[in-house]
Amino acid sequence: MSLAATVAEKANLIWAIADKLTGAFKPHQYGEVILPLTVIRRFDSVLEPTKPAVLAAFKEHEDTPLLDAALRAATGGLSFYNTSPFTFTRLLDAPAGLVPNFRAYCDAFSPNVRRILDKFKPFWPHLATMAEKDILYLVLKEYTTSKADLHPDKVSNLEMGYIFEELIRRFSEAHNEDAGQHYTPREVIELMVNLLFAHDDAAPADGNATTTIYDPACGTGGMLSVAEEHIHKRNSRAGLILCGQELNDETFAVCQADMLIKGNEADFIKNGNTLSDDRFFGQTFDYILSNPPFGREWKNEKAAVEAEAARADGRFFAGLPSISDSQMLFLQTAVAHLKPTGRAAIIQNGSPLFTGDAGSGPSEIRRHILENDYLDAIIALPNDIFYNTGIATYIWLLCKSKPAARRGRVQLINAADLYEKRRKSLGNKRNDIPPAAIEEICRLYTDFAESPRSKIFDVADFGYTKITIERPADPAAADPASASADADATPAAADAPKKRGRKPGKRKADAARRDTENVPLRENIEDYFAREVLPFAPDAWIDHSKSKVGYEIPFTRYFYQYTPPRPAAELAVEIHDLELRLADSLAALFAEER
């Protein structure tokens, strides 16, 4: 059975179990019951074959310092265990004591699993409701059928990750929650991972060397899992450390459970707010992938973020974005946590490309990234590929040590038309990025050549100096001979009093006539001023004290293709034909009325 078929079958089966909750729970509560039960069933399926050995080890080493090590060894080397004589199947043998037995069974998990289960806070009150409504036995029984066997021999770790994410997406969509907050389409993750490892020097090392991967908004761990799978396909002996931080308790718990079962270090997945409580502060990573939330305000984190921005060793010293959108804070988090030889891929919507005037927080963030030559490429993705938004989205590729040919340069790739329509929409997701499109995008990136879909720029091409143009309060009093002089270096002729009451000194500017110009960094400001301003305002001058450098990336402008209007004669013929058809329709209508 194919990967997609297995995931669909298991997800459909578990989704159908939620039907047993009808009447006892409201639809928005279904996920609070089914997700933790699925996690527990996964642990149960993994541990069931070694249950006799674990019980024997528990009996032999109980109350000794060797107990934990002996129990782990009895599982065949897993980092978790359960010392209860019950399994999901054996729980059903005693229906009368199902609730206390189930609680005892959950309490018998190793401490690392119990900490995960504690994150499913609503589940434990729901357990009592299920018993009261006489549905607990029915629900658990559904999980013990052969189709619900979640042992890794039947459902791989990769498939289980897909199933968890599919369930979260379905439960979120069922009651109009933001599914996309926790779920990134797999083809998007695969594209990001392929781009990160597109260069020959990106292959992880063998042996004792470890490759570190980090996601500051990791959700259920989908990006980490796909990156892990990709690396192990390239090098099965590569040592990996997967790290992430997640705010939502339930998705954090799913991610930690997935890591435990795969044999990864679950403690490297942290629970908490990345913006206000960076649990990996000061650490750097080889690879970073993330799809942080779009348009999420950071008002609650304002004090902590501003305090960190004031520190030279903080993530946010370059600048702060609008309080209404935190995604550029995650962009700076990726930059701060990237090793000098590392690579990052982070999804952003269109606003980080251009919002904010020169000197503003967003412009200063772009300036820091561009002037330090951290931005490698930006890829425009097709619209309608995410579940919760149809807006334009982009992958930012960051690299602190670019290959020689790419240094000082930035590649923009327009992949907006590389998609295929879905047969059936899922929320806002109407399009998919097929494997052939992923291959084409990666080819464009590695070719690093100009084409209709690929443009290459020097870093300075995105910069400009915003200059302030002043004009005198009384144009008639201005001295044309000194109109282009700097306000701080006005010639003596212009300083001479020409009107009663005016004192010598700087020319007096009229704020109502003030204007600004954005001068490309590559241009000489005085030459630009002489060419673009003085012919139209000979009395103007530049107030250099107000000049500011800004950066923006007008992505769509670079790929705009002019479509000439249709000839007037052609339009006239078309309009005439429409008029004739309309007249015929009206004549037929009135003829029918008569």
Image: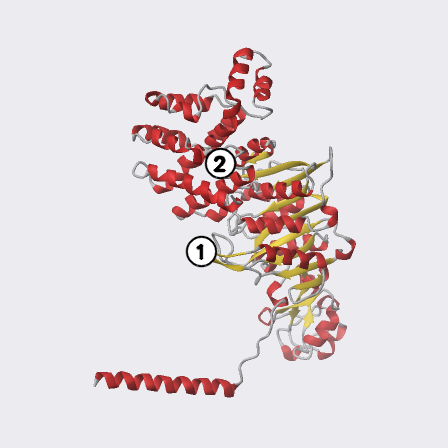
Label pair 1/2, CB-CB below 8 angstroms: no
- The answer to whether residue 165 shows anywhere in this view is no
Q: Residue at x 55, y 53 (%)?
A: 322
| Element class at badge 1 | strand
Residue under circle 2? 249
Residue under circle 1? 425
- The answer to whether residue 264 shows anywhere in this view is yes
Counting residues from the start of the chain, the first of labels 1 and 2 encountered is 2
Q: Give the percent coordinates (x, y) of residue 223.
A: 58, 44
Q: Give the percent coordinates (x, y) of residue 462.
A: 68, 62
Which one is closest to the eye, mark 1 or mark 2? 1
Q: Is residue 458 left or right of residue 248?
A: right
Q: Amino acid at mark 1?
A: Ser
Q: Is residue 303 left or right of residue 502?
A: left
What is the C-alpha distance between the residues marked 1 and 2?
Answer: 29 Å
| Element class at badge 2 | helix
